[in-house]
Amino acid sequence: MKNPFLPLPTMLLLHPAQLELTYHLRASRVAVAGGCIALNGPLNEKALRQAVQHLPVLFDVFRWQFDPACTNLPVTVGTGYELPELPLLDFSREPNPQQTADAWLQQRQLSAFCTNFHPFFDLVLLRLSATEHRLLVRGHQLLLDDTGCDRLMSGIARTYTRIIEGDGLPDPVPAYAGEVAAAQFYNNSLAYVEDEAHWQREFTELPQTLFPHRNYDLIAPLPYRFAASDSLSRTLRQAATVLNESPDYLLMAALTLFFARINNQAVCTFGRVVAGRQIKSQFPVVGRFDRLLPIRLRYQPELSLRLLVQRIRRQHRSDNSHRHFPMSHLSRTLGAVRSCLFDVLIQQQPAPSALTMPDLICQTTRLAPSGVYAPLHICWQEGSTHQPAGLQVSGLPNYISEGDARSLLVQTEHLLADFARRPDVPIASFEVLPRFIREYLSGRAGHCFTDKRISEPARLSVPGH
């Protein structure tokens, strides 16, 4: 077969969004994203291996190699390419194949890439029985975001299907190299100047910290991760239904009320993930085009919840029109001591894409992101036919302990429940602390936070949470 590879540059060009993310790599040496495809039915392993080896033809970015452990990216990258491997791990003889496979997948999710070979991605096929397999797809977070992971897994499914049905292999999608090369012109364009002016106006002053007197060193011990309670997930869904609003907007509103009143400050700044795939040619391209942007929200007690969320939406849209500006440039301009302009990152993650493959029942799930780009990350995962919606939390223990993070969620759930009951009252009427917390605090001394609307000091940690 003729070599289908097109000539590519010998230097890997990173998209501006990826360049920005390199400033956060020190937060975690392990930066892995990806997903898992559960395949139930008679799998044609030979066809699947052909589909995997066709990936670098579909997506030219997989022909590049680099060292994910390197902290001085971007680096010079050679074009020497090795076909992707698909090792097979057979768990079918284990007493409990599913449990053993789940434990292996969890460990693999947190592990770094192989020390001898540093691809952007790797794949592993797990056999649980003759008719049950799982395909693990992992990639470095500089390459794979949620959208890129969906494109990659859909590419595997599309190629496998065409092989089984006897059709020709799919043609390459638009090149990653072309999209990144075009993006390099942004830094010398008028759009860059206009975006910079917008963010300079937004940040004439550095944002106040949401958790005072905490350690902001992002080189932390291993981050913790946990799923929020089902009760909180149900409350968030209910509030989103009642108000017909996005869950991430409601989380921003609840946390704005909490931190503004606890810290007695008018403005709170949060982080959010913004997808930059508005360009049609980018839709089928694998590569990280997401950005981490701050959003500054003002606490105005006289507003109703509906008006507060309306202003959050308006601010969100205004900032999105300037989404291409690298926040790392603004941090350097402002002389920010910390590596990011926000303490809490709020994300709404879409449900995994649905896949169809001949004679197979497919279920796709995403790996929880292993990189840490903010001291506290709250991610709402939308539900699918086989995976319920839920809230995932990760954090750095030297910034906020896991116990304190769980306590914060208790207070967030209390506010969200009140949102659903009283969406049109002034936000000043919402109690930040649940009654049982206020009763516990009565007569006790606290040193972490104080709700300025009540006389009792308010500790973040609550026994039993």
Image (cartoon, rainbow, N blue to C red):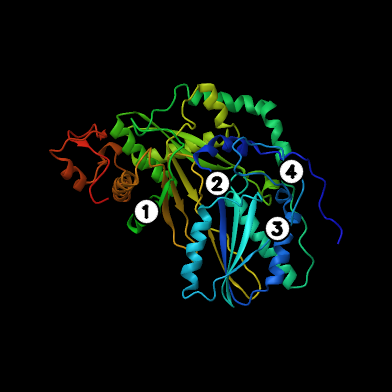
269 displayed left or right of 84:
left
Check the image and report above or below for 44 versus 76: below
Q: Nearer the viewer, mark 2 or mark 4?
A: 2
Q: Are marks 3 and 1 in contact (CB under 8 Å)?
A: no
Residue at image coords 81%, 52%: 5
Q: Position of residue 354 (x, y in %)?
A: 58, 63
94 displayed left or right of 447:
right
Q: CA distance from mark 4 to mark 3?
A: 20 Å
Q: Position of residue 407 (x, y in %)?
A: 30, 46
Residue at image coords 44%, 45%: 222
What residue would you read off at disc 3?
A: 84
Q: What element does badge 3 sit on?
A: loop
Which part of the image, by quadrant, shows the N terminus? bottom right
Residue 351 seen anywhere in this rendered image of the structure: no
Mark 2 or mark 4, earlier in chain: 2
Q: CA distance from mark 1 to mark 4?
A: 39 Å
Check the image and report above or below for 232 versus 342: below
422 displayed left or right of 188:
left
What residue would you read off at disc 4?
A: 177
Q: What element does badge 1 sit on?
A: loop
- Disc 3 crowd, CA 10 A, few/some/many (<14, 14-19, 20+): some
What residue would you read off at disc 1?
A: 228
What residue would you read off at disc 2?
A: 31
Q: What element does badge 4 sit on?
A: helix
Amino acid residing under circle 1: Ala
- Disc 2 crowd, CA 10 A, few/some/many (<14, 14-19, 20+): many
